[in-house]
Image (cartoon, grey):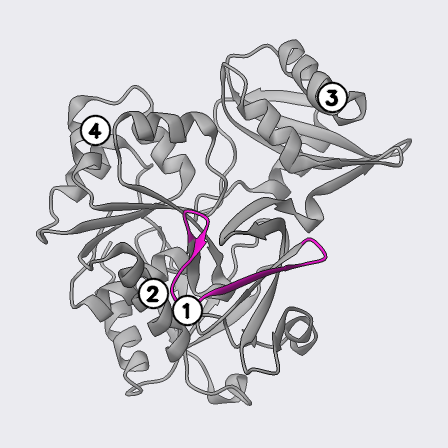
Amino acid sequence: MNPDSALVALSASLNEEGPAVEILPGTTNNEYVVNPVARAELEGLEGIAAVVRTSGSTGTPKRTALSIDALASSSMATAEYLGFEGQWLLPLPIHFVAGLAVLTRSLYAGTRPWAMNLEQSFTARGFNEAASALTDRKRLVSLVPTQLQRLLEDPDAETISTLQRFDAILLGGARAPRAVLKEAARHSLKLHLTYGSSETAGGCVYDARALPGVQVKVVDGRIMLGGPTIASGYLGNAGLTARHFSVDGSGVRWYATDDLGSYADGMLSVSGRADDVIITGGVKVSAAQVQRVLEALPGVSAAAVVPVPDAQWGQQIAAAYVGSAAPEALSAAVRASLGAAAVPRRLQALEALPLLPNGKVDRMSLAAWLAETPR
């Protein structure tokens, strides 16, 4: 995969020498289409450098407008938090914000990212080969939990050595299973857990602490993020923009996330999504809490919990997991921790969870499949 054309177009946009760009997937995983964004679409928005689509893991993707200031602030805040800049390995699609952020950080650092071949499935061998091409003394990589999990499943010495040579491994996009984090700590990997989204120009909270310049608050349980990295809004959706974005009396721009959590002593704790509550038979159950119970059990490396329609109960809890644990053991653990109402009525073991191109679980397709699975 060669991101050079995207780098050139993005560089021109960031330097105000070219139009805002929108990077879209091409005909293969190694190809991209770099489109200029028409001025008419950006009416009322100033200094937009890039338009990036949200993942669409829980609904229709939104076109998020990111300004030059937002992308620059995100890059500088990341470098300030880490204490250095360097060369990035790019194992993620650049039409999603995590991949776009690698391009932006590379441009501001004056380094060239080295892109992995995404036409093949993500493997330790491919990761090691790509990492060996890095030439800068400081090495960085951004991964999603599924990728790190594959690298740490029965790893050989070469893979561990490759991972240990990275000065920073940013892990985000989804909650990492406890077993993956434990294994990463065992090998003393320089891991940073990141939290953010397309609307915040990528990760803006690292290791539960806000990056320099980023503000965090929780209103009625909902996480709100503020500061210079916040997007300008959604193209073609003024209503959704007004619902999620605002500017306070001090001129700080805020983004109201769909996540729930708490913020105390400068530490952010994310408990789940506002829309992850499954109401079954009138009882509210947090899908995130059920997932945590499942992933904490021996013999479960990953799990996903989704609602499926039910004529009698309105919704039923369904779950898929990767591992060798017996379904009976999983049901018993959920019942003991969260009560009978939280026990998944449909529970399936899979070789792998269905993923979107950015590494997030494809919850929509999983829910549709589980809905058709016999009880």
- Reading the image, the residue beneath label 2 is 77
| Residue 27 visible in the displayed image | yes
Secondary structure found at label 2: helix
Residue at 27% of width from left, 55% of height from top?
82
Which of the two discs, 3 and 2, labels the residue nearer the N terminus? 2
Secondary structure found at label 4: helix
Provide residue 81's location: percent of width, then percent of height.
Answer: 31, 58
Task: Give the residue type that dot 2 points to.
Answer: Ala
Marks 4 and 1 sit apart, C-alpha to C-alpha, by 34 Å
Task: Give the residue type that dot 3 points to.
Answer: Pro
Provide residue 138's location: percent of width, then percent of height.
Answer: 14, 51
Contact, CB < 8 Å: mark 3 with mark 1?
no
Please give the label number shown on residue 160.
4
Residue at 67% of width from left, 70% of height from top?
240
Q: Circle 4: is it few (<14), some (14-19), or many (20+) Cα within 10 Å?
A: some
Task: Give the residue type that dot 1 points to.
Answer: Gly
Provide residue 210's location: percent of width, then percent of height.
Answer: 44, 58
Task: Give the residue type that dot 4 points to.
Answer: Ile
- Reading the image, the residue beneath label 3 is 374
Can you tell which quarter of the image residue 20 is in? Answer: bottom left
Q: Which residues are magenta?
A: 206-221
- Reading the image, the residue beneath label 1 is 213
Residue 99 appears left or right of 43 = left
Contact, CB < 8 Å: mark 2 with mark 1?
yes
Which of the two discs, 3 and 4, labels the residue nearer the N terminus? 4
- Mark 4 or 1: the one toward you: 1
